[in-house]
Amino acid sequence: MCATLTDTARDRERQDETTLRERIAANPEPAIAWSLVAVALIGLEFGAFIAGLLLVVDSAVIAVTALIEVTVGLVSPSASESIVGIQQAASGTLDGFRSTANSLPTLLSRETIPNQGYKTGPNGPWENTFLGLEPAVAWAIRAALVYAYAAFVSFWAFRGWKIFRANYRQSDWTPRDDVIDRLDGHRWAQFGIIVVLIFTTMALFAPALGPTTVEQNIQSPYSHELQYFDAEDGEVRTALVGDANFNSKSKGNGEQNVGPMTYDDFGRFHPFGTLTNGRDLFTFAVMGARISLTVSALSMAIAGLIAIVMSLASAYYKGIVDLAAILSADGITSIPQLLLLLMVAMAFQGHWLSDVFNGGFLLALVFGFTGWPGLWRAVRGPALQVSEEEWIDAARSFGQRPSVTMRKHMLPYVLPYLLIYGSMAVGGIIIALSALSFIGSGLGINPPTPAWGRAISMGREYVSTQSWHIALIPGVLIVVLVTGLNAFGDGIRDAIDPESEGGAEEEAAAGGTAG
């Protein structure tokens, strides 16, 4: 028995010393089986996958060059112009590559399952649609396949983590295992996860989900044509998309209203109906989801990075560093966010930064740099708590570098709390973005780029009419998404700290009874 225990300890010690590559080489079958399916899933959407990566790279290039350009511009305007030229050249090259990637046919693309067509007679058949089906049916098939694909990708990613945990992870147990086990029975958290996945899929696959495209229906409607069956003449005619939009407006009365799940007079199917200008509301909504989630995610990345760095540094060094963090946070909090947004909008009016992400980049910067004090206060307590643990003192006594101690021993403890409060803060940013677009006046996302708040503003006069869908549907989307984000944050909090779900109250009741 002793020999067995010794051998087991030695085996575990040798396993701890091996790299992940060596552990996979020793047992490759699970990794190969999982990787083959993962490669197949990427291959089905290879063009969209590459385009998404290029978009992330382009965003990183814009962010870095913007910071450099603004900093250098304070000293040398000519040098800042050179930086702008470099940025434009790099973005132009990436845009070309992204256009090429987007042109690649994929399983879920509009070209593979088209839904825009026209009737050849009063009772059909339909031309240029998938298998000659009605546009509504073709669109529903494509949308269902998109969400089925996204669901399977999410499932397979989670399965990959389980395979890693069972076969290749060095430790048999980590605190994350208990967190995931608790989430398995947490219905409120599962609701939040499902909502987040639904809206994330909506944002990632917005071009494929819409019954039409933003460029054709919203941005340049008079540069595109469509064919439709004219019931009066009994012939197939051609019209500009802009003219078709003009004659498909929803303005509250029976003659000017295209409601949800209906066709307009030009044979176009509208799952959510049309806007007051005749544009498709569903296409507007899904692209609005992409804008909202992109800006809020970028804002949280900026705010979260600053909050983590400040909380770890102030908890580790304490003293003057903690005081400096407190003063910085209080100073930023004292500035009204709306006033700062107005100042930034005026200062960068006409600047190339105001056109990046249609004004969303500047909004993300403002929300990020004004939102970190709230996150910092939320994670400062856990950071101070873990900084007093014995293993932190042991790391100091062994001469470990502070950066290594903070990254290895403090960050894993603090990061879950950032996830909790960050997910809840995202909901606030989404509401603020919608409010800015609702107000207009140069704030929010630049028109005609889709924004949920703008749709609500357009439809507020028609809430009690047949065109109720214009304001109600985007409003419901905002409420559901923010509720889902809060549910996700609540679930993570309960999974990390089981006592927050009622354990403390039960202990108090038991103590009172015993007394």
Image (spheres, rainbow, N blue to C red):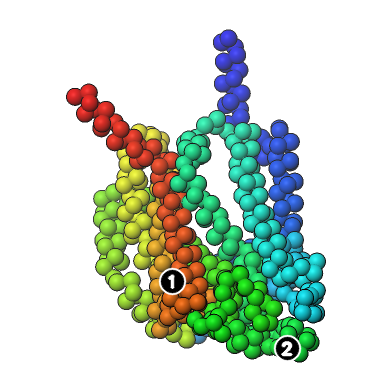
The x, y position of residue 9, in whole percent, is: 56, 21
The x, y position of residue 178, in whole percent, is: 48, 35
The amino acid type found where label 1 is placed reads Ser
The amino acid type found where label 2 is placed reads Glu
For this orientation, the residue located farthest to the top is 1
Residue nearest the viewer, comparing 415 with 276:
276
The x, y position of residue 201, in whole percent, is: 59, 59
Q: Residue at x 53, y 75 (%)?
A: 450
User: In screen coordinates, is 110 left or right of 434?
Assistant: right
Specify the quadrant of the image occupied by residue 103: bottom right
Q: Residue at x 53, y 67 (%)?
A: 289
Residue nearest the viewer, comparing 434 with 315:
434
Q: Does 141 appear above or below 27?
A: below
How many angstroms separate mark 2 from mark 1 (CA)? 42 Å
10 Å neighbourhood of mark 1: few (<14), some, or many (≥20)? Answer: many
What label does residue 127 carry, if any?
none
Q: Does 109 appear above or below 252?
A: above
Give SS at disc 2.
Answer: loop
User: In screen coordinates, is 407 left or right of 381?
Assistant: right
Residues at discs 2 and 1 in contact (Cβ within 8 Å):
no
10 Å neighbourhood of mark 2: few (<14), some, or many (≥20)? Answer: few
Quadrant occupied by the C terminus: top left
Residue 97 appears anywhere in the view = no
The x, y position of residue 383, in whole percent, is: 35, 46
Residue matched to label 1: 434
Give SS at disc 1.
Answer: helix
Q: Residue at x 59, y 88 (%)?
A: 246
What label does residue 232 carry, if any?
2
Q: Earlier in the sequence, mark 2 or mark 1?
A: 2
Specify the quadrant of the image occupied by residue 343: bottom left
Q: Nearer the viewer, mark 2 or mark 1?
A: 2
Q: Residue at x 80, y 74 (%)?
A: 125
